[in-house]
Amino acid sequence: MSDPLPWNLAFSGAEGVSVRSEYDGASGLLQVTLSNNSEVVSSRPREVRLSAPLDLAADDGWAWLHGRSSSSEALVRVFGDIPEEEYSGDYVRALEGGRTYLSQEVVALTLPSQPSPSLVIGSIRMDRISLDIEITVDEDEDGISSLALVFGVDGVEVEPGQFLALPPVLVIDGRDPQAMMERYADEVAAQMGARVPERVPTGWRSHGQAEAAFIEEPETLARAGIRGDSFEIDGGMAPIEVSAPGKKDLADRIRTAGYRPGLALSPFLLPEDSAALRESPGLALKTRKGGALLINTPQGRCAVLDCTNPAAESWLREAIGTIIKEWGYGQLRLDSLDAAVRPASEVAYTTAGTTGLANLRRGLEIIREAAGDGTLILAGDCSFGPAIGLVDAMQVGPTTTALWVDGLNPSARRASSIVLQRNWMNGRWWANDPGSLVAGDPLSEVEAQFLATTIALSGGTVCGEAPDDYPAALIPPAGIAARAIDAGDGPVPSEWRVDLGEGRALVGILNWEEESRWVVVAEYLRPGEVAFDAWAGRILGKGDVLLRPHEGTLWQVAAPGQSPRVIGDTGHLNYDGLYQRQVSGRVQVRNDRKEARTIGIEARGRLFEANLEPGEMQWFD
């Protein structure tokens, strides 16, 4: 017997198909089963829609909406607010007398009118069938009239008399939507065998020049003492097109310089004029009319790989094997991956029953198997669900550029606003890749600091093209993502905090606005805590701090503890390279880095800053 759903939800109404749903209150899982009761005709629905009528007050309520890929939106929609600027609007659909808000794969909905105010609904397995969650509100957005689950099953076929269990859906209520989202992420990770690297990846990429222009770059970085795990070069559109001798020699030079060699590829795209496509046209995904599917990309017209075709699998497996085992690359950055996600009703996959998500999943499985478990794989422009368990890092937002804002085009503001809304993925599904830190005109120094604050709060990778743009304090990354202090602060929160353990924390305050704002330091500190401004290199009092437009400030926070002690450090957010030893009421510190640093000291009730040159040691009592 099915248990009652939270908020007394009652889903029903799938048209044209027979469905049965059962909810287990202990696990929070809703299981929906699709049946074909016909004795002769196969069932091929494109979607299965279940709707629950509601009559709930939405006053002061909000929905945390998510897209299913790095290029999609993520935001908090506060009901009744004016429409958000600088967002695509793909998440809202106009209706007569109201509108519907759409979230993909997971949603967090908070209504203060409910005894248990927060509800999280999310698909536990996203490697074949998608889930859209629809929230319908009235015109004034002061009431919610329905909530719907829409399973995307385009490509799925249910034979006569057979049934299909759709992916389990977590449906839970509570009071802390961020903790509930983290529980959701943990359940998905367990179900899909998520890969989380022991160390958050760091590294550098070529500047997109010809090979001759950057062949000396890894050695130059090594001589300069630039920290980082890897150095990555652009490998072109498809692995089979890469020139083997040059790339192997470059991998050897990168490794000799002390970095892991990395190669960037778009493995599921075949340029229209490529030798691979000319020699093996069967690699390409076909339209329903039988011709190769060709799509427009920034690199020109390309065919898409049919990852379910045995010939394509063999080609991809051989190409990846050559790159890893013969040329010696230990890292792959895979881009344009969502090119493989094509509606089954529009194309002809070789293997029956394949969905767009399943084609992407199969391609990533082939790459992981060919590359081996020890290869670090980073993904970009990719649907999140099919990649879980197969990649080590994921680009979670759009590209960052040296523009603060540029409408819906890539910009610093747009990237930051989306990256932070996906902090709950970091360390659970993979290491989040927040994108590159860019600096220089027309981006101001303040805006570059805003980006650096975002990267620090993401807890994710530090990988970019210009190492000089990155403060030494960011490398290596802390690896722990911050939480919003007020999760309902929409469309993206301004205040964030991450607890690092041992009484230490980071607090970040972001000014998204065009006007300056005053910040009261004491409002963000717990009893007894002291704060050190990591960018300015000074201890903060209990007064106000002025944030300029587009400015981000990052504080190292220390709880009460043994004195004397270090309470802040411009050298690194986690004190990397700062030797510390307490002896008989004194503390010894030494700067083991090549850069000078300023530290904050608490000693006998006094707070002060001290400068340390490289190699310098001081005692404080």
Image (cartoon, rainbow, N blue to C red):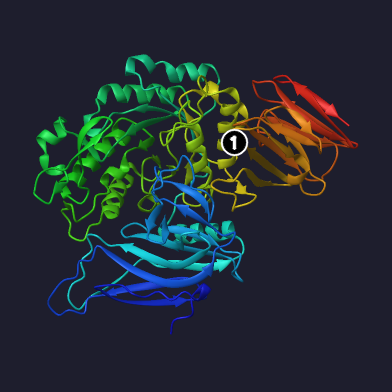
Residue located at (54% from left, 26% from top): 227
| Left or right for 125, reference 240 | right
Q: Is residue 286 visible?
A: yes
Quadrant housing the C terminus: top right
Q: Residue furthest right?
A: 604
Quadrant housing the N terminus: bottom left
> Can you say whether 249 is above or below 507 in the image?
above
Q: Quadrant of residue 379?
A: top left
Residue nearest the observer in this picture, 605 or 299? 299
| Left or right for 424, reference 280 | right
**Secondary structure of the residue carrying numbered label 1:** loop
Callout 1 crowding tier (Cα within 10 Å): few <14, some 14–19, many ≥20: few
Q: Is residue 124 visible?
A: no
Residue nearest the observer in this picture, 5 or 314? 5
Residue nearest the observer in this picture, 334 or 440? 440
Residue located at (84% from left, 27% from top): 619
* Residue 363 x %, y %: 27, 47
Total numbered badges shown on the rendered structure:
1
| Left or right for 289, reference 118 | left
* Residue 273 x %, y %: 15, 30
Q: Quadrant of residue 556?
A: top right
> Can you say whether 196 is above or below 331 in the image?
below
| Amino acid type for the residue under numbered disc 1 | Glu
* Residue 540 x %, y %: 78, 34
* Residue 38 x %, y %: 17, 79
Residue located at (70% from left, 37% from top): 555
> Can you say whether 566 is above or below 348 in the image?
above
Residue at label 1?
Answer: 513
